[in-house]
Image (spheres, rainbow, N blue to C red):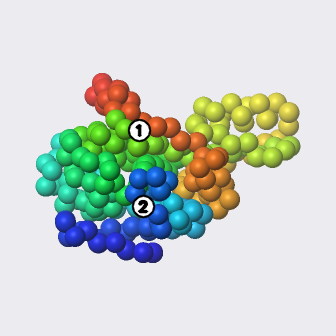
Amino acid sequence: MNRASSDRYGAVAKLIDCGAHGPGSGAELFVVEGDSAAASVARVRDPVTQAVLPMQGKPLNAARASRDKVLAHPFFGPLVAALDVECAAQCDLRRMRYQRVLVLTDPDADGIHCGFLVLLFFHRWLRPLLDAGRIEIVRPPWGEVVADGPPQLAFSEPELGLLATRARERGPATVRRFRGLAALDAMLLRDACVAVATRRSTVVSAADVAAMIEIVNHL
């Protein structure tokens, strides 16, 4: 695993970097949960245009933290350093080392929470990236149903249940829930989560994150 240190903040990022950087490079940074997920994604990525940075534990709530605390955090400090942008309401995106950031977390409740906390950080401290459409959420497969043909992928618990019901109407079926990115078959991880042409990803706007915050505040 390549390591890059942050000159500005004295943090060491477990960054698995790519070869291309800057405007027009097509470079993208995957943010994942932990070293195991980072190693799995690194094995199937394009090393020229795709970098990987693992979280170190669950991210803090950056909306309630000071700038100094955010930059001292073992994940957010290295993230800012890897992007090479100023952690501020106004930042020069022409300096950004990657054209987009892809938040790829495990297909479970903890992963969804971690992904939300990462989006909360961008909403509070690097909103220009959201406004420019530079942040995406990747939807990993939630599970699969194996019956009388090729496995059918589901990307949510309701979809998995529906596929299982339909399959069992025709005969025996096996349901498998995926517990983490590191547990996915390499080809499945590449095609469903990493490869540009086949992954399921959605650009996230500042309005989208604001709507998420509103929902969470009313829970």
Q: Is residue 105 visible?
A: no
Residue at x 68%, y 59% (from the top left corner): 187
Mark 2 → mark 1, Cα distance in angstroms: 18 Å
Provide the residue designation for mark 1. 133
Residue type marked 2 = His
Q: Is residue 164 left or right of residue 155?
A: right
The x, y position of residue 85, in whole percent, is 27, 54
Q: Quadrant of the C terminus?
A: top left
Q: Quadrant of residue 95?
A: bottom left
| Residue depicted at 41% across the width and 53% down the height | 23
Residue 120, horizontal then vertical, whole percent = 30, 41
Q: Is residue 141 above or below residue 205?
A: below
Q: Is residue 216 left or right of residue 72?
A: right
Q: Residues within 10 Å of mark 1 (few under 14, many from 20)?
A: some
| Number of the label disc, if any, that sits on residue 207 | none
Q: Secondary structure at mark 2?
A: loop
Q: Marks 2 and 1: which is nearer the front?
A: 2
Q: Amino acid at mark 1?
A: Gly
Where residue 31 appears, as percent x and y from the top left, is 42, 55
- For the point 65% across and 52% down, the residue is 191
SS state under label 1: loop
Q: Is residue 66 left or right of residue 200?
A: left
Residue toward you, 134 or 218: 134
Up-down relation of residue 4 to residue 191 (above or below): below
Q: Nearer the viewer, residue 58 or 3?
A: 3
The tag on residue 21 is 2
